[in-house]
Image (spheres, rainbow, N blue to C red):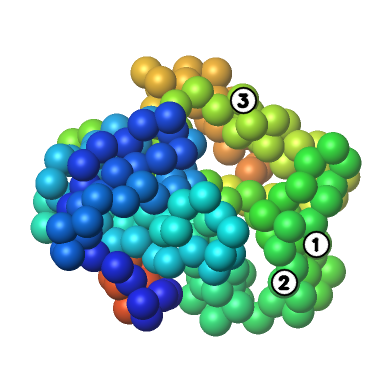
Amino acid sequence: MYSNFVKGKFIRRYKRFLVDVELDTGQVITAHCTNTGSLRSCIEPNADVLLSPATNPNRKTSFTWEMIKINGSWVGINTNMANVIAYNLLKNNEIKEFKNLDLIKREVKFDKSRFDIYAERADEKIFIEVKNVTYKDGDYALFPDAITTRGQKHIQQLLKAKDQGYRVALFFIVQRTDVKIFAPAWDIDPTYSSMLREAAHKGIEIYPLKIKVLPEKYELLEKMEYEL
């Protein structure tokens, strides 16, 4: 995680990719939001937020929105971190079903898609697609929080890879701790939800992973139960 977070208070999000934040100094700045979803259940006026400074000095926004504090705990907003977390969990042997991998690569092309992770172990060749989950409804962590045609395509491609002999899995990185069970968001994207359920029946492995995110680190708390 970052060691140089900048603290502030959430003001508003707009145009999907922009968020206004009042820094502790009182200055109001505009930061970049990597998350293209609706961020429902993650928006709270005046909530504490953490920003990371941009590494590119030529970027229009000088900060990236990383976290927001909801219900007393941090929620990870940056979708790019989900891939980093998944990769490191595999690398550190923290997921028992994927221990002792011989090879782990990020962003590997297959057919007309690019999957987040490719891995090998003995005779197994594995493709893993990673999704970031922030949407909460009661005790449920739900995905997606907006219609995702890209996610639908990924399921189709994972099934194609399975038909060609690959082991395939979906990692749902739940970057909040105030939830107990994972499920697809049927009311938001019934097509994706139906495809996910059918894909599970056809052998795509589902791993909802609850992550405790903190400014200085993240921690895998559990593989969550799920309902399809």
Percent position of residue 93, x then y: 55, 79
Q: Quadrant of the C terminus?
A: top left
Residue 228 versus residue 103 in the image, above or below: above
Q: Which mark is residue 162?
A: none
From the image, tell me which residue sits under label 1: 125
Count of marks, rendered view: 3
Q: Which residue is mark 2?
A: 104
| Amino acid type, mark 1 | Lys
Picture residue at 76% right of the left edge, 47% below the top:
114
Query: Looking at the rendered structure, which numbered label has been put on residue 149?
Result: 3
Does 88 appear above or below 83? below
Left or right? Give the position of 90 relative to 10: right
Displayed quadrant of residue 195: top right
Q: Earlier in the sequence, mark 1 or mark 2?
A: 2
First reached walking from the N terminus: tag 1 or tag 3: 1
Task: For mark 1, give the secondary structure.
Answer: strand
